[in-house]
Image (spheres, rainbow, N blue to C red):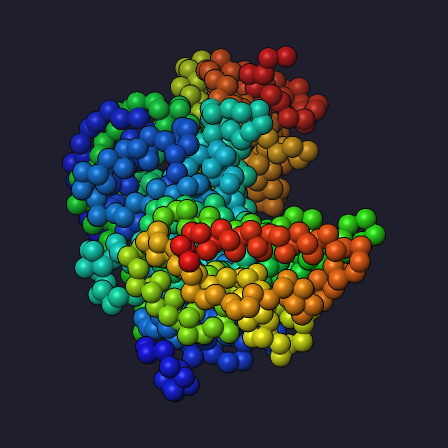
Amino acid sequence: MVSQKVKGKPVALDGDRAVAEAIRQMNPDVVAAYPITPQTEIVMRFSEFVANGEVVTEFIPVESEHAAMSACIGASAAGGRAQTATAGAGLAFMWEVLWVASGTRLPIVMHVVNRSLSAPLNIHCDHSDSMGARDAGWIQLYDETVQEAYDNAIQALRIAEHPDIMLPTLHALDGFILGHGVERLELLPDDAVRSFIGIYEPQHPLLDVDHPVTYGPMVLTDYFFEYKRQQAAAMERALEIIPQIGEEYGTFTGRYYGLMEGYRLEDAEFATIALGSTAGTIKTVVDELRDQGVKAGLLKLRCFRPFPATILAEALGDKKAIAVLDRSLSFGAQGGPLFLEVITALFTHGLSPKVLNYAYGLGGRDIVPARIHQVYKDLIEIDREGLTESSIRYLGLRE
Amino acid sequence: MAINLKEMSAAQDLLAPGHRLCAGCAESIVVRQVLHAVGQPVVVASPTGCLEVSTSPYPYTSWRVPWIHNAFENVASTISGVETMYRSLVKQGKLEDKGIKFVVFAGDGATYDIGLQFLSGALERGHKFLYVCLNNEAYMNTGIQRSSATPLGAWTTTSPVGDAVPGKRENRKDITAIVAAHDIPYVAQAAPHAWRDLMTKAQKAISADGPSFINVLVPCQRGWRHPAEETIAITKLAVETCVWPLYEVVDGEWKLNYRPSPKKPITDWLQSQGRFRHLLTPENTHIVDSLQEIVDRQWDKLLERCKA
């Protein structure tokens, strides 16, 4: 553990390269990955690290994403650190084995560069991919900036490997917006990262031939339910542990992380909730509105799985009106995945403020400040005139 | 381990008795033969299938060695990950190099069909492991459905015999040749009645410097419709009729291991199993003729490849 603040090195990198740097510094025993836009640069960059001998990692250039996750499962069960990176259709292709990874309680780390799902084919950002995996038993963190992509990549490992969690963990950065967007960030010294992540002590490694274990048994009606209940309990424990790890990370980086971040939220009357890079755009708009005397605020959710319902409800309980911004659709549902979580959190905490749901940014559609201004305008309006209809609003759609 | 009955009978089986495979199933016979030949330390992987469900019903396990099951299609990727982690940890000095061997036991569905891409990828990447296909020529675990290993004319529950269609309409594909086309160090076909041949092949395969593959014919009395006690006799018949030739491909050199004399007619093979019973009627003679023609053609091609 590093207790004193270390000096970071300021650099300008895009999100993919920043994540590749984080993987290099974590120096996993095995990386198995397959290229897909907009994640490809991570695999390319990491392959260079391997070629140049900058990591000890054995890289498996697999023939598909399904094989990438399958190989990570084998590698992690064998008794070492395994990581991968993917996007969009690649994550969808892994879907079956995402459940194997979590059900087997393997602390695999995955870097997801968000991309829409076909059809029609589109390589740009939305959250359909990671939202499609939201019930697969993986911890999910979302990055607002390239710095956060780097920081969350490193913290993901500590979260996954925590003995009270032991669940695979992914963090998601918005494709192109962060993945290919160059920003200033501070890279930690290699030894600070290695000290933070420590030495991995596998609990029942498959490679311990003197103590043979059976991985992936068939479990039927007599024990399956109990297996799954333990998995759910680990997720619940993660709600306590993720902020502790975020706090520890802050002690030496100066960048503290919780489950969510409130931006001018405490005294706000009108709040938006969002994941990922859009939070940055919203912060700008909040500042502008504050200058105009509008009490606007933002709740940026960092951790979507497990969902921090209680702190979210506490933070939102006194708001006059709330907008939930979803970067994916759940066809036929009563709102986007984030909206449904927020509504449930509010209801189960006895709160019933006015809440609007916006779908936005599908297939990489730009979300510009003017659109966010429209959202706050809508919130002020429904506060004044009441909520007349509750259907999903499509932000930035050409109609 | 030396391949002789005395030593084999004295050694402990690495697959424990008490598993739930059917009486007459050849899978446990082959697994025990191969593991005897390969010896310890060994790590085994299996995809979803008969062997997996029959040996790992939690909280029990039949495996006296480390064993991993991931999913149906991806055992080749799984063992790739395990083997690569081993190399990584040994390279870093985190693990002592004990010379661990890696063996896959997979059914034909997991090998010929749903897992072919994963197998091909692992072979191309050159991971050092032995892949044993336990080929019972159909999806037996789900209840005898046709696979691309199922021969022409065979009855299965998805190639049923009806008034319009007399069993499976397509012939099986030659996965052994497909694997050999990857130019890996060792590829072979084997059968459990020829146990010394099979075990010698397992030892050659595991000693190869790279991936190796053995396709083993394993009768399924439930699916093939034969008496449980006929299993071994039936694999012998498969070899005597040239339905299942025994050969190996060592560093690209094809070598025939056994030449039946005389070569028995396909009808001997068809008569031994209920899954072919409908073919032995006058209206299906043309299918029998086709099967004989296929066997003859493939046998001649094999002889040519083996320069035998």
Front-lying residue, A318 or B73 = B73
Query: Splitting the image into 4 quarters, where does residue B254 fall?
Result: bottom left
Front-lying residue, B197 or A51 = B197
Q: Is residue A181 above or below residue A240?
A: above
Residue A188: % across, % down: 20, 38
Name the residue located 66 percent from the left edge and 19 percent from the top edge.
A385
Front-lying residue, B130 or B254 = B254
Name the residue located 50 percent from the left edge and 71 percent from the top edge.
B192
Query: Splitting the image into 4 quarters, where does residue A151 fall?
Result: top left
Residue A31: % across, % down: 32, 45
| Figure label count | 0
Residue A330: % across, % down: 62, 34
Residue B98: % across, % down: 25, 68
Q: Farthest front residue?
A: B262
| Residue A164 in sight | no
Quarter that holds the C terminus of chain B: bottom left
User: Is B111 displayed left or right of B147 in the figure?
Assistant: left
Name the residue located 57 percent from the left edge and 36 percent from the top edge.
A337
